[in-house]
Image (cartoon, rainbow, N blue to C red):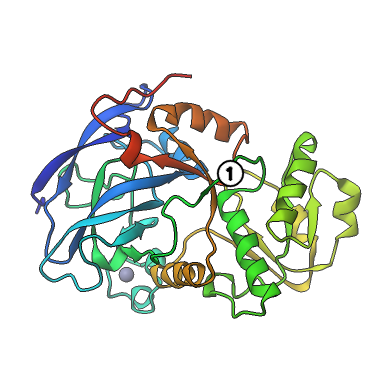
Amino acid sequence: MVKNTAEIVYAVGVTNSTEKLRLIEIPRREVGETDVRIKIQYTGICHSDLHFICQEWGPLEFPAVAGQEIVGIVTNVGSGVSKHKIGDAVGVGCSVDSCRICTNCSRYAEPYCKNRVVETYHSPTDDAVGHTLGGYSQAIVVDEEFVLSIPKNLDLAGNHVAVLGLGGLGHMGLLLSNNAISKKKKFPPILNSCQACSGSAQKSQSSRSSGRTEDAYKLGASNVIITSDTAAFQAATDTVDYILDTVSAKHDIDALITLLKTDGKLVEVLLVEIKETQEMLDFCGKHGITSAIELISVNKTEQTFERILKSDVKFRFVLDIAGTLNKDTVIEEI
Ligand SMILES: [Zn+2]
């Protein structure tokens, strides 16, 4: 049964396959018994969003709204909600529902649900338009089980920096590894198997290599391997215990594997379970680790996609939803 719509909110998306991103209006469902309504403050822009909007992952259902790294403030909760309350800072990741009963769901591995993974955007849902709509929007309604608590000491937007270099996930991997290694702390589960990942194997253009190297060292890398530096890459053959691979664009995994020792592990960062994500956030809150971001006005979304294509990416692009998405928003064309 289609759920009732409670409100219409502004979003940035597309309504057919030929148009550019633009301001659109989308429905959000009524807050059900176990639902949380979130007024979105910020949403990450990542390469996945670009793959999605450009239909590289298959044809789109319309309207299509990307955004799967959402942070905001709880403005309403259903009568049965116990984990979150009005005013809490919360986050939503790449999934918003699952079957909850299969063997994977039972062990908190919802992204691998065998029956019904509902991703934050473009998955079938009982909400009005029939598929989920992501975080490039003013508000979202999500079941409390898929809403993460954000520790009070973490700035929702992170720190503002403007440096070329590692990706959003990669720089967090470095920060977390470095923090845990230098202070001999227990790793958060997400990095349990990455204790040797203090170096960075990034596919890189040589012109940017030195800048990236510097950034990586600042973030705590003890060694940096640039794939375009053939000699350095060969010298590192068979020296690495774990590789944390956070690159979503096409890249040469065979070459990376040559770095691994015989028993080494290649960890592909794709989907992360809700429980692990919460533990990682708690770890970051406890140790004051925030991501380095460049804040983007919503009207620059198209340009930002273009910059991602050109690898002109700061650690993480974040869309300033609360500050710049409103009825007058015009998405600038490239
Ligand atoms: Zn399941």
Q: Is residue 172 left or right of residue 211?
A: left
Residue under the image location 85 percent in, 45 percent down: 229
Q: Is residue 117 visible?
A: no
Image location (x, y in percent) of residue 133: 28, 44
Q: Is residue 269 left or right of residue 156?
A: right
The image quadrant in which ligand 1 is located? bottom left
| Residue 49 to residue 170: above or below | above
Residue placed most toward the observer, 57 or 315: 315
Image location (x, y in percent) of residue 167: 60, 48
Residue found at the far front of this picture: 153
Image location (x, y in percent) of residue 53: 41, 35
Residue under the image location 35 percent in, 65 percent down: 148
Q: Is mark 1 within 8 Å of ligand 1?
A: no
Q: Which residue is mark 1?
A: 161
Task: Please tell me how many numbered marks the rendered image carries.
Answer: 1
Q: Is residue 13 left or right of residue 279?
A: left
Residue placed most toward the observer, 49 or 54: 49
Mark 1 neighbour class, 10 Å CA radius: few under 14, some 14 to 19, many 20 or more: some
| Residue 159 to residue 81: above or below | above
Residue under the image location 77 percent in, 48 percent down: 213
Residue placed most toward the observer, 210 or 302: 210
Quadrant location of the N terminus in the rendered image: bottom left
Image location (x, y in percent) of residue 127: 17, 49
| Residue 104 to residue 67: above or below | below
Kindly indicate the quadrant of the structure image that contains residue 60: top left
Residue found at the far top of this picture: 333
Q: Is residue 58 visible?
A: yes
Mark 1 secondary-structure assignment:
loop
Task: Tell me the kind of residue under disc 1.
Answer: Val
Residue under the image location 28 percent in, 72 percent down: 100
Kindly indicate the quadrant of the structure image that contains residue 319: top left
